[in-house]
Amino acid sequence: MPKTKNKVILIIFILLANFALFSFARAETLKIGFVTDWEYGKYKKFTHKLPHKAKKYLKQAVAHYNNQFKPDLVIGGGDYILGSGVSKKKAKKQMIEINRVFRRLDAPRRYCIGNHDLSHLSKKEVQENLGINYNHSVTDTKGARIITLDTNDLASGEDEYKTNGRVSDKELAWLDEQLNTELPVIVFSHHSPVSTPEGSSWRINILSADAVRNVLEKYGNVVAVFSGHHAVNYSEKKNGINYFVINNLTDSKARGSFADISVETDGESGEVGISVIQYGKKPANYSVSKQISQ
């Protein structure tokens, strides 16, 4: 009788172990940090921004990621410097200084480029100062594809970047190519492809944003798009895609804003769940899910 009992216990243990391994194989959790609009600069206050607080707040975000959240990847959302009232030489120096803080991360980093970064510097110079070799990127990890999109294009005849974002036809073609995958996709961009509330009106963040959204919607596998640029907490679901705007790191009302993003992908069912925790003086939490066709 004891031998039979031991066999039963052993069988139950094996079944439970196999179930646990099966469940682990099915579901993967990807952890992403997102911190945007550092706006580092010489001013104590500039409009709604606190440029001289950028190092302090970014150090807090880096410490949180290294010691608590421990993400697989951290994305910088662009506008790393304010770029106002300084020379080109000073702008370069400021970008290198603030990036030294970001480089203390234990996790791999990816960068979006913001319009303020291009006030004095070319994209090539921004790359050199950040230690990167791209304007956009694609990363496949833990069952998902992570894309950073370049939303700063110059129109014909322009010689300097404006506040609004613009995505070139070439960039849209590249995005289309990267979205042609069976993996669920999370996109990061400085400017949001949706409009955001601004008092009693709405701010257009990307000119011809409908063309960007058409590409994002083409394959049905984009779960979420995360952006910065506008200092608001905002989320919207549009045609099956969840859009989030994470508040600025140095916004005087949000102070120290950054986000933890957890992406859970179930390879068996095709269900992708995303939870977002935004920190700072204006915290926000979001939780969404999407079924990806198998």
Image (tube, helix red, strand yellow):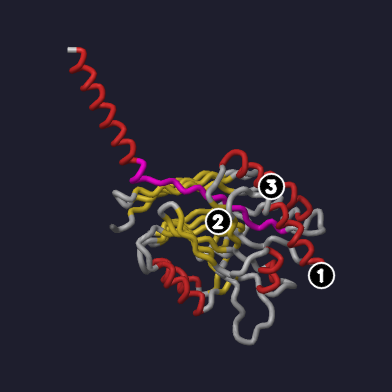
Whether residue 25 appears in magenta in the rendering, the answer is yes
The label on residue 245 is 2
Q: Nearer the viewer, residue 95 or 278?
A: 95
Q: Earlier in the sequence, mark 1 or mark 3?
A: 1
Whole-percent x and y of residue 169?
Answer: 50, 79
Q: Residue at x 66, y 75 (%)?
A: 161
Q: Look at the image and tell me in which quarter the C terminus lies.
A: bottom left
| Residue at mark 3 to residue at mark 2: CA–CA distance | 15 Å
Q: Amino acid at mark 2?
A: Val
* CA distance for labels 2 and 1: 31 Å
Specify the amino acid type for callout 1: Lys
Secondary structure at numbered mark 1:
helix
- Foreground mark, 2 or 1, reads 1
Question: In which image quadrant can residue 166 be found?
Answer: bottom right
Q: Nearer the viewer, residue 273 or 280?
A: 273
Looking at the rendered structure, the secondary structure element under dot 3 is loop
Q: Does residue 21 sit above or below 75 in this rendering?
A: above
Circles 3 and 2: CB atoms closer than 8 Å:
no
Q: Could you tell me the amino acid type at mark 3?
A: Arg
Quick one: label 2, few (<14), some, or many (20+) residues within 10 Å?
Answer: many
Pointer 3 or 2: first along the chain: 2
What element does badge 2 sit on? strand
Residue range corresponding to the magenta coloring: 24-39
- The single residue placed furthest to the bottom in the displayed view is 157
Q: Is residue 179 magenta?
A: no
x then y, percent, for residue 251: 69, 52
Badge 3 is on which residue?
255
Give the residue pinned by disc 1.
89
Q: Residue at x 21, y 13 (%)?
A: 2
Q: Residue at x 38, y 62 (%)?
A: 239
